[in-house]
């Protein structure tokens, strides 16, 4: 009997589950995610399931990891400092295609070079300019992204640039052609930038997970969940961390299907940072072939068609001062709950909250606390950021004690974007403590924070809330409302009959909202979901019954809903997908675009034979590297052609090879 270990590292909790023979949950457990050293949280969760089950570490035959870290980092705009090498494009492309926003001030260079649609060199690559840049601004980063024009037709210039960078800096390099075989250079460049930004984070996670497994005596293969729900080997995930965006949500869909057997349902997974909504059709999650969208970014990574919103149990509560009524909104940034940080640093947090509550006037930074995150690369920091980090040191501080002037605020924001500091503030988790829905951390601190937040004045001069419980109800009601919006937006997106407006506008439309409230005057308006919802996440049972009532739908909260991600992490299959292209530069000429120089054939069949063999071998190599021994291979193709003078003319073809199988189970 094989024992399988699934682990999910989320923004707040790390989950672990043991499953016997892919059929029975033997044990499950949670621990807090320890961002400064992820191994601590991973180890605590694994130790808990081992103790609960009584099994020996050596009995575990396979371990698999899913994570929301990459997703959360992109939603919150965090990650390490990177450099972009942009070859054959125009300088203005950086701005017009959103690359400037994605770089967030990180260095970039536009170089001569690139190829044309047929894979022929369009201009010579300017290697000297790259070397000069690496000696200057380009040498101040942790990783690099390289994107060359038509690199999917001929990656020669990306390969040359990557070799030069590796030789000179010894830092990791993300090449756009290795992340997607599709055209659209700026979008591939964006994907490469995000991949480079995530490399350090995912590398540390896998290294820490691997080390912790070994220290516990678990000698089993380690897999990682990809964003489409498939498994890949840990070493492959280290080089392509962008493929782990939506890893946690994808695992939750696999877990939801395994837990409920549902064929058709919306699945909503609430975490600490995000709410992830997707649809199961015929028991399978839909794949977004246009590329995963996370936060503001549309990548070229194929992943589940997930609708990710910056909304979770640990979302920042933000005050809306506009208008007479005032109000609040949640997210998209995550905050450490006040109740949690008070349980970790009570001598700092509780006295500060009490002092702030006693003051006659509320301070700008009241109710906010800050601490540094160790073991994160600090390349490229300015003098003011370094000064702030030294001021914070290794302990928790009220934010007002750290920010000494307005000039400090921009440096503080940059530290947050780099993931170098964490901020604690009021969250729905704190509201749940005061309302008796949770009792995990420090309720007294949550009550003080809610009382303080409720003192804020609306445009009419009234307090936002009269007491902590009223403030807590405002927060929970807002969470219910925003969750309902997320579910409606996903449903409108997936509707087969179009409504003529964007899904986000439809979800927020006055008729939709009046329908949720059951409006009945001269006109009766009803709004709701005509499909069941499966609620997942540690706090789903706390928040989701009210969401089901709001939307008038059946809300299923399965047993083990809180560890569905960890379950999905270990019951999936390895799936390696490789794509390649054949073009026809002239009649009777068929060009196969490979990882190196293109190859030209005079026969279409010969071209397909060559590309099929090449992609199949690539897929087999990566499948074997991911531990699959019994490999299933499938192939599909799309061919574009046109009629000219009564004849069918070949234009282009795309070949897709898929290799799949279950990963090898270690002998136990």
Image (spheres, grey):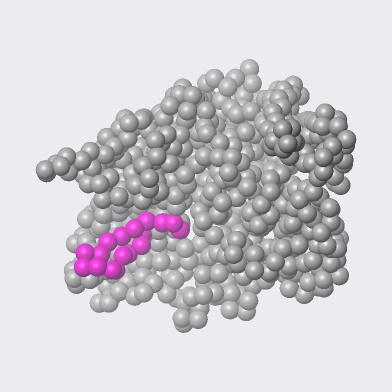
Judged by its main secondary structure, the magenta piece is strand
- Tell me where residue 382 appears, x and y as whole percent: 63, 76
The C terminus lies in which quarter of the figure? top right
Dividing the picture into quadrants, the one containing residue 7 is top right
- Tell me where residue 580 appears, x and y as whole percent: 75, 39
Dividing the picture into quadrants, the one containing residue 375 is bottom right
Left or right side of 381 for 131: right
Magenta range is 317-333
Front residue of 372/420: it is 420
Residue at position x 50%, y 41% in the image: 306
Residue 453 visible, this orientation: yes
Residue placed furthest toward the front: 645
The N terminus lies in which quarter of the figure? top right
Residue 372 visible, this orientation: no
- Tell me where residue 108 appears, x and y as whole percent: 70, 68
Front residue of 653/584: it is 584
Residue at position x 20%, y 40% in the image: 525
- Tell me where residue 602 appears, x and y as whole percent: 88, 35
Residue at position x 28%, y 45% in the image: 512
Does residue 512 sit above or below 82 in this rendering?
above
Left or right side of 291 for 367: left
């Amino acid at each position: 009997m094989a024992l399988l270990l699934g682990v999910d590292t989320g923004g707040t909790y790390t989950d672990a589950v043991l499953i016997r023979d892919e059929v029975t949950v033997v044990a499950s457990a949670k621990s807090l995610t320890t961002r400064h050293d992820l191994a601590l949280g991973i180890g605590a969760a694994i130790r808990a399931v081992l103790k609960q089950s009584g099994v020996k570490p050596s009995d575990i035959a396979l371990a698999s990891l899913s994570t929301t870290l990459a997703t959360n980092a992109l939603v919150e705009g965090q990650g390490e400092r990177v450099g972009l090498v942009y070859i054959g494009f125009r300088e203005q492309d950086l701005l017009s295609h959103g690359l400037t926003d994605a770089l967030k001030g990180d260095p970039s260079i536009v170089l001569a070079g690139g190829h044309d649609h047929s894979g022929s060199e369009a201009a010579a690559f300017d290697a000297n300019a790259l070397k000069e840049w690496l000696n200057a601004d380009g040498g101040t980063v942790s990783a690099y992204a390289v994107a060359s024009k038509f690199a999917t037709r001929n990656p020669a210039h990306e390969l040359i640039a990557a070799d030069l960078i590796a030789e000179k800096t010894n830092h990791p390099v993300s090449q756009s052609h290795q992340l997607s075989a599709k055209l659209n250079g700026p979008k591939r460049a964006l994907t490469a930038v995000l991949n480079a930004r995530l490399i350090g984070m995912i590398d540390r996670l896998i290294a820490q997970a691997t080390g912790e497994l070994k220290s516990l005596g678990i000698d089993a293969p380690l897999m990682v969940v990809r964003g489409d729900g498939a498994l890949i080997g840990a070493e492959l995930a280290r080089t392509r961390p962008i493929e782990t965006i939506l890893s946690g949500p994808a695992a939750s869909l696999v877990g939801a299907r395994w837990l409920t057997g549902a064929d058709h349902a919306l699945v909503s997974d609430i975490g600490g940072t995000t709410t992830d909504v997707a649809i199961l059709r015929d028991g399978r999650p839909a794949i977004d072939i246009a590329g995963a969208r996370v936060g503001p970014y549309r990548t070229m990574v194929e992943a589940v068609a997930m609708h990710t919103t910056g909304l979770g149990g640990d979302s920042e509560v933000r005050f809306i001062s506009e208008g007479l009524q005032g109000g609040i909104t949640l997210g998209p940034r995550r905050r450490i709950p006040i109740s949690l940080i008070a349980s970790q640093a009570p001598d700092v947090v509780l006295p500060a909250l009490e002092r702030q509550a006693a003051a006659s006037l509320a301070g700008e930074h009241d109710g906010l606390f800050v601490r540094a995150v160790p073991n994160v690369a600090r390349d490229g920091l300015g003098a003011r950021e370094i000064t702030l980090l030294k001021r914070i040191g290794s302990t928790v501080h009220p934010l007002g004690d750290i920010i000494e002037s307005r000039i400090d605020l921009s440096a503080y924001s940059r530290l947050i974007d780099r993931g170098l500091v964490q901020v604690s503030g009021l969250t729905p988790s704190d509201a749940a403590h005061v309302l008796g829905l949770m009792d995990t951390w420090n309720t007294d601190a949550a009550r003080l924070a809610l009382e303080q937040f409720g003192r804020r004045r609306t445009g009419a001069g009234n307090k936002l809330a009269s007491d902590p419980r009223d403030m807590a109800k405002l927060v929970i009601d807002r969470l219910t409302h925003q969750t309902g919006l997320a579910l409606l937006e996903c449903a409108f997106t997936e509707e087969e009959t179009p409504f003529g407006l964007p899904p986000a506008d439809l979800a927020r439309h006055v008729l939709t909202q009046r329908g949720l409230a059951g409006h009945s005057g001269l006109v009766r308006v009803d709004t709701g979901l005509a499909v069941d919802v499966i609620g997942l996440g540690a706090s789903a049972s706390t928040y989701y019954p009210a969401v089901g009532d709001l939307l008038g739908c059946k809300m299923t909260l399965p047993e083990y809903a809180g560890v569905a991600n960890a379950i999905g992490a270990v019951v999936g299959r390895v799936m390696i997908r490789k794509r390649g292209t054949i073009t026809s530069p002239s009649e009777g000429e068929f060009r196969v675009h490979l990882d190196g120089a293109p190859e030209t054939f005079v026969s279409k069949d010969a071209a397909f034979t060559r590309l099929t063999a090449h992609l199949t071998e690539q897929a087999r190599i990566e499948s074997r590297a991911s531990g699959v021994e019994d490999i299933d291979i499938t192939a599909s193709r799309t061919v574009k052609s046109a009629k000219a003078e009564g004849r069918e003319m070949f234009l282009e073809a795309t070949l897709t090879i898929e290799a799949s199988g279950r990963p090898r189970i270690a002998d136990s």
